[in-house]
Amino acid sequence: MGDNTIIAIGLIIGLLFGMSGIATLFNFMGMAMEETQQQLAQIGAVSTLVLLIIAIILIIKIRIISSLIVGAIIGAVLNVLLEMNGINIANDVFQMIAKALGL
């Protein structure tokens, strides 16, 4: 029972740090949008298009990074829950990949 308690505590701490990271990414995205908006208000039309493209690229990058982090957190949570129930899905997946590669 001690192992399950340690795993549960680790899971809770991991979720808290993960949510903090996601909040930081969204805060960064908000700051990037504010800076872009300020610069767009000060610069002419040609530069506006360049800055708009840069802003779109930044938004896409931040969304991809936040999606990867959320996916990693969800995967870790599911893996821990399955491990607690005696299901070793990671080992099964690695064995299937090794078998497919002929290792």
Image (cartoon, rainbow, N blue to C red):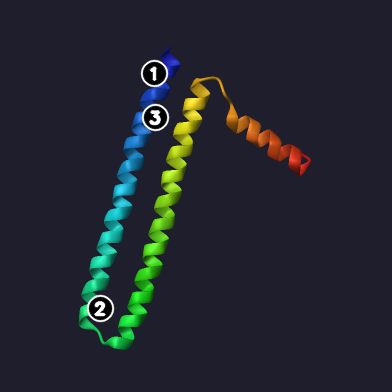
Question: Residue at (39%, 24%) from the top-left corner?
Answer: 8
Residue 21 vertical placement versus 84 (above, below): below
Tell me, yes or no, whether the two marked residues, 2 and 1, touch with CB atoms within 8 Å.
no
Query: Residue 70's image quarter?
Result: top left
Residue 64 in percent (x, y) is at 44, 56
Q: Disc 2 vs disc 3: Cβ atoms closer than 8 Å?
A: no
Identify the mark nearer the N-term, 3 or 1: 1
Q: Which residue is mark 2?
A: 40
- Relative placement, left or right, of 44 versus 66 is left
Going by the numbered disc 2, the residue's amino acid type is: Leu
Question: In this rendering, would 3 be left or right of 55?
Answer: right
What type is the residue that disc 1 sits on? Answer: Thr
Residue at the spot of label 1: 5
Q: Residues within 10 Å of mark 3 (few under 14, many from 20)?
A: some
**Percent position (x, y) of residue 92?**
65, 31
Q: Secondary structure at mark 2?
A: helix
Q: Residues within 10 Å of mark 2 (few under 14, many from 20)?
A: some
Q: Which quadrant of the figure has residue 60? A: bottom left
Q: What residue is shown with label 3?
A: 11
Q: Measuring 45% from the left and 49% from the top, which residue is drawn there? A: 68
Label 3, secondary structure: give it. Answer: helix
> Which callout, 2 or 1, points at the residue further toward the start of the chain?
1
Residue 36 position in % (x across, y down) = 27, 72
Q: Quadrant of the C terminus?
A: top right
Q: Secondary structure at mark 1?
A: helix
Kindly identify which numbered label has been placed on residue 13.
none
Q: Quadrant of the N terminus?
A: top left
Q: Residue furthest toward the right? A: 102
Position of 97 relative to 6 (above/below): below
Q: How many marks?
A: 3
Amino acid at dot 3: Leu
Q: At x 25% / y 62%, what residue is drawn?
A: 31
